[in-house]
Image: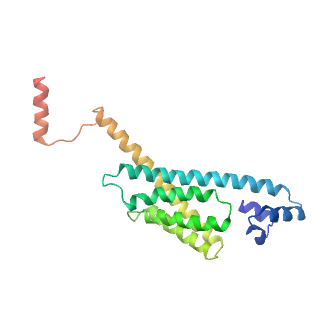
Amino acid sequence: WDQYTRDHRVPQSVLDEDDDDTWEEWSYENNHSDILEVREDYWIQYERSNVLGAFSYAAMGFIEMCSNRNGYTLHNLLMPLGGLLGMINALQYDGSAMQYGSAASLTFYLLSCTRLDFFFVGSALECIVSYAYLAGFDGPLLLYLDSIACLLWLYCAVVGVAAEFGFSFEQFLRKERVISTPCSPLSCAQQKTDRYRH
């Protein structure tokens, strides 16, 4: 979308507006009626992607909250709350409301971090970018930081899923006794004795 608007030389004054009247007026004056359809398709895809991404974080936070043996704490609620807020924010059409909602949701993600890892760094970068947009800053540097943060989050997601599958597969192999469970000399001797008895 950014590349498309640059190719069609859409002025920043129009990009900053969210109402359809401004876009329709500019497109008719500059003979770019197709940009309205492209803009509509872009916002539909953007909304779906945001809702899906926020739902994933809400679901992940809810699962972790339910599987926590220490009970429910405020810290456990931050991830699903951030995801739910992100889903609501994705359905907003007011640009200003979306910026504030995004900043609040990302702040919840950052506060939900329990250790210094790539997810923490990605959340911190996303918060910096979000706060910068709220302060009125703009430019390619923020886009680069946003891209880096997204890559860090993607890395954490891939590693987390791979680790979960690896752990589940290992448990399956142990259950099927393909991998022997380490035992002490005394317990191993007892196991051999039990086998001879049977």
Q: Is residue 159 visible?
A: no
Colour scheme used in the picture?
rainbow
Residue at image position (57%, 55%) is 87
In the picture, the quarter occupied by the N terminus is bottom right
Q: Hey, which quadrant is residue 38 in on the image?
A: bottom right
Q: Hey, which quadrant is residue 175 in on the image?
A: top left
Relative to the observer, which residue lies in front, 128 or 108?
108
Measured as percent of width and height from the top left, residue 2 is found at: 71, 62
Measured as percent of width and height from the top left, residue 26 is found at: 85, 65
Residue at image position (62%, 64%) is 98
Residue 86 appears left or right of 17? left
Query: How many numbered circles are shown?
Result: 0
Residue 153 lies, with reference to residue 14, above or below; the image says: above
In the picture, the quarter occupied by the C terminus is top left
Q: Residue furthest top?
A: 198
Residue 22 appears left or right of 190? right
Residue 43 appears left or right of 76? right
Residue at image position (40%, 51%) is 64
Q: Is residue 98 visible?
A: yes
Residue 112 lies, with reference to residue 184, above or below; the image says: below
Residue at image position (77%, 72%) is 13
